[in-house]
Image (cartoon, rainbow, N blue to C red):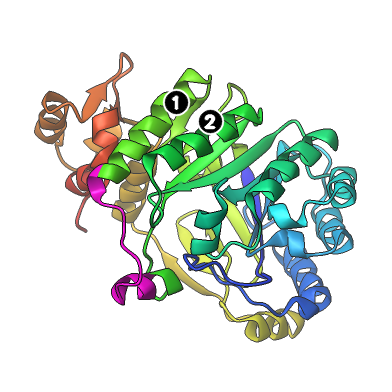
């Protein structure tokens, strides 16, 4: 199974924490769409497998007129797809726009809410407010969307445990099918990292962040969500198909400026520059970079991705190049990993707090 990711880089303004490629040149949507359509036609059969999922992300895809999204979807084809997802900003979620998205083939929405607290939304540079977030979900439901995911963030500056509990309770009350939740990361080069370095904001301490994460897992479990990946929770049957393909290490094609692809053992990516991308595609001379993954690279990625999920990884894989038996047993005895009946290794709740360290111990240095 192959997934196709379409990167829409346009944003009204850049969120303070974001390190994805984006631009505020919204007036270039038409020419960008034509470049994307051309790249799809050039690369559609690249994996030799049928495309079963489509994910339109960004950036902020909902800054684009529906006619551009429709042209992209028509080029790929929407019939027979297992899942077609699009990210939207709550501030763009008008009744008409959502109905149009349904009409052109979008099946699943990923709404970037992050918080239901206006003061926190301002602190991280979001352009919507809490009421718009709630309204966006309700309008999407009225438009007929029955597969809605929302994003929530924790460990935000000045965020209290009470605020976090309120955000989760609000999300649960809205009746969505999927919740993705991430602790704030201070990525190099982002505005919020610069603010931290200048002592303008105080990061949440690690203990509080862990408590927030544990509460998230417990509360969503009580609400009937399956914790199927470190940061992702779904009502049964609503696990993200496209994203699950990433974690299963299935092939995917990335279309658009800055988009990444994985085909076989080759990872490639497009330039993070709007002019370079558009001109390169239209001139049939796009300079994509790539790297070939060694068998050790592939092993490390499968371990890293697999241990993030509730399916874990097989002991056979973990012992493929060397015996990890003693390391696994040590983590099991310390309550960080556990062994299932079918000889798969999964992380415990305690282990999820230290997952990076666990994965590092199990990786191979080629």
Question: What residue is rendered at 81% in x and 60% in y?
Answer: 72
- Residue sitting at x 64%, y 56%: 5
What residue is pinned by disc 2? 169
Residue 338 is drawn in which quadrant?
top left
**Among the two numbered marks 2 and 1 on one chain, the one whose residue lies closer to the N terminus:** 2
Residue found at x 69% / y 63%: 43
Tag 2 and tag 1, C-beta contact below 8 Å: yes
Q: Nearer the viewer, residue 28 or 302?
A: 28
Secondary structure at badge 1 equals helix
* Image height of 238 relative to 364, above or below: above
**The residue stretch that appears in magenta:** 193-207
Q: Residue 73: give x, y in percent of width and height.
A: 81, 54
Checking the image for residue 219, the label placed there is 1
In the rendered view, does 87 fall on the left or right side of 311? right
Secondary structure under tag 2 reads helix
Tell me the quarter of the picture where residue 68 sits.
bottom right
Q: Would residue 342 be found to the left or right of residue 67 on screen?
A: left
Spatial CA span between label 2 and label 1: 8 Å
């Amino acid at each position: 199974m192959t997934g196709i990711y379409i990167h829409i880089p346009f944003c009204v303004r850049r969120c303070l924490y974001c390190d994805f490629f984006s631009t505020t040149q919204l007036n270039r949507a038409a020419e960008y769409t034509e470049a994307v359509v051309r790249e799809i036609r050039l690369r559609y059969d690249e994996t030799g497998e049928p495309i079963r999922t489509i994910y339109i992300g960004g950036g902020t895809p909902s800054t684009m007129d529906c006619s551009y999204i429709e042209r992209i979807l028509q080029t790929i084809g929407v019939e027979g797809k297992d899942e077609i997802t699009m990210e939207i900003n709550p501030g763009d979620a008008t009744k008409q726009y959502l109905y149009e998205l349904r009409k052109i083939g979008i099946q699943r929405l990923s709404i970037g809410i992050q918080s239901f607290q206006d003061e926190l939304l301002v602190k991280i540079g979001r352009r919507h407010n809490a009421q718009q977030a709630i309204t966006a979900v309700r309008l999407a439901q009225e438009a007929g969307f029955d597969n809605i995911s929302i994003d929530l963030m924790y460990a935000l500056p000045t965020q209290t445990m009470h605020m976090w509990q309120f955000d989760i309770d609000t999300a649960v009350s809205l009746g969505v099918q999927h919740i993705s939740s991430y602790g704030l990361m201070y990525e190099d080069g982002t505005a919020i990292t610069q603010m931290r370095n200048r002592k303008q904001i105080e990061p949440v301490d690690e203990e509080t962040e862990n408590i927030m994460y544990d509460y998230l897992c417990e509360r969503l479990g009580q609400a009937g969500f399956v914790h199927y990946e470190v940061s992702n929770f779904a009502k049964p049957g609503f696990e993200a198909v496209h994203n699950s393909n990433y974690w299963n290490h299935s092939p995917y094609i990335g279309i658009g400026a800055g988009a990444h692809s994985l085909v076989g053992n080759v990872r490639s990516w497009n330039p993070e520059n709007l002019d370079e991308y558009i001109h390169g595609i239209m001139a049939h001379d796009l300079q994509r970079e790539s790297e070939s993954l060694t068998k050790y690279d592939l092993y490390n990625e499968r371990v890293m991705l697999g241990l993030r999920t509730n399916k874990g990884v097989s002991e056979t894989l973990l012992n493929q190049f060397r015996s990890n038996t003693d390391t696994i047993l040590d983590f099991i005895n310390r309550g960080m990993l556990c062994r299932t009946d079918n000889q798969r290794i999964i992380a415990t709740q305690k282990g999820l707090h230290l997952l990076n360290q666990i994965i590092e111990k199990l990786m191979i240095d080629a």
